[in-house]
Amino acid sequence: MSSPQRTLVARLDNDGDVLLAGPAIRAAAASSEVVLLCGHKGAQAAELLPGVRRIIRWDCPWIATPAPEVRAPDIEGLVALLKGVRADVALILTSFHQSPLPLALLLRLAGVPRIVARSVDYPGSLLDVRLRDDPDIPESSQALGVARAAGFELPPGDDGRLAVLPPPESPFPPPYVVVHPGASVPARAWSPQRCRAAVEALCEAGHRVVVTGGPAETELTAYVAGANGLDLGGRTTFAELSGVLAAADAVVVGNTGPAHLAVAVGTPVVSLFSPVVPAARWAPHGPHVLLGDQGALCAGTRARECPVTGHPCLDRVTPGHVVAAVQQLVGVRA
């Protein structure tokens, strides 16, 4: 079989999911041109990934939250767009609770000759190579396995870690610690009160603290920063955030995109990890300290809102625990 000239990689989730696809994308890009199909919520991460030649943005009705309406003209337009890509092979990257088969059908209609994915369900003629999910393998390794099944390998010297394009210089001279209080899923976020108390405790321990967040989180970051932290909520692009994280001693963050962005720039993470999804799959794939009760009643529920009164899996973590974890990580780099 001849080497593919163009590879379509699909990862249709949020920024963190797209960052975790990075090693698989670099493997494909080592011997082919990569076109990345992603949702709008993952596009700013896609723009930072080495090896991506072109980005196609599309919000998938069976993956995006909130889910857009399924409309025939939209689907027909996507099929026409994918046909114009003229991909030799497609890698569909999904998490264990998502099916790659609807997209595989659209790719077949677009004429993609070879499609590789992981699938729990019988794929019939929709997949040329079907892999099984392994619950004990980190998400980035799962994705890299799909690329390898398609015949791609990382280039010499690439260790398979998360990586992004060189970040811009931070506007703040180190040393400092970043606290990122928000999360795309509420069940994965530490309470604002705990975050604010952690900022105060870190400052009392002698750390400068920078609080980060997106444009929709400015009220939260202002509260968490209080009088002691520097509030950057809504003031950085995703690329600029990578620079702020890269210069930090450590990042205190939940299971959300900036945790993986911190890993990608080599910064250790204090991971406030709610067990609604398994840490074996989603914990930071780099130097980190994992905080949170992984045996809590919410474990494995994939809940978006905490199903247990008081959010005990995370809110039993104290600011003192965070300060101790930061002290453990200062000076540790990937």
Image (cartoon, rainbow, N blue to C red):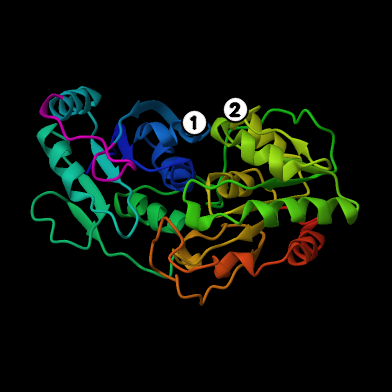
- Principal secondary structure, stretch drawn in magenta: loop
Q: Residue at x 15, y 37 (%)?
A: 106
- Counting other residues with Cα less than 10 Å from the Cα at mark 2, is it few (<14), some (14-19), or many (20 or more)? few
Mark 2 sits on what residue? Answer: 237
What percent of the width, then of the height, locates residue 158? 55, 47
Residue 134 visible? The answer is: yes
| Nearer to the camera, 296 or 79 | 296
| Nearer to the camera, 36 or 129 | 36
In the figure, 83 relative to 290: above or below?
above
Q: Are marks 2 and 1 in contact (CB under 8 Å)?
A: yes
> Disc number at residue 74?
none
* Amino acid type, label 2: Thr
233 in magenta: no
> Disc number at residue 44?
1
What percent of the width, then of the height, locates residue 214? 58, 34
What percent of the width, then of the height, locates residue 237? 60, 27
Q: Give the position of the N terminus as an image quadrant.
A: top left
Magenta residues span 60-73
Q: Is residue 118 found left or right of 143 in the rendered image?
A: left
Q: Is residue 146 found left or right of 187 in the rendered image?
A: left
66 in magenta: yes
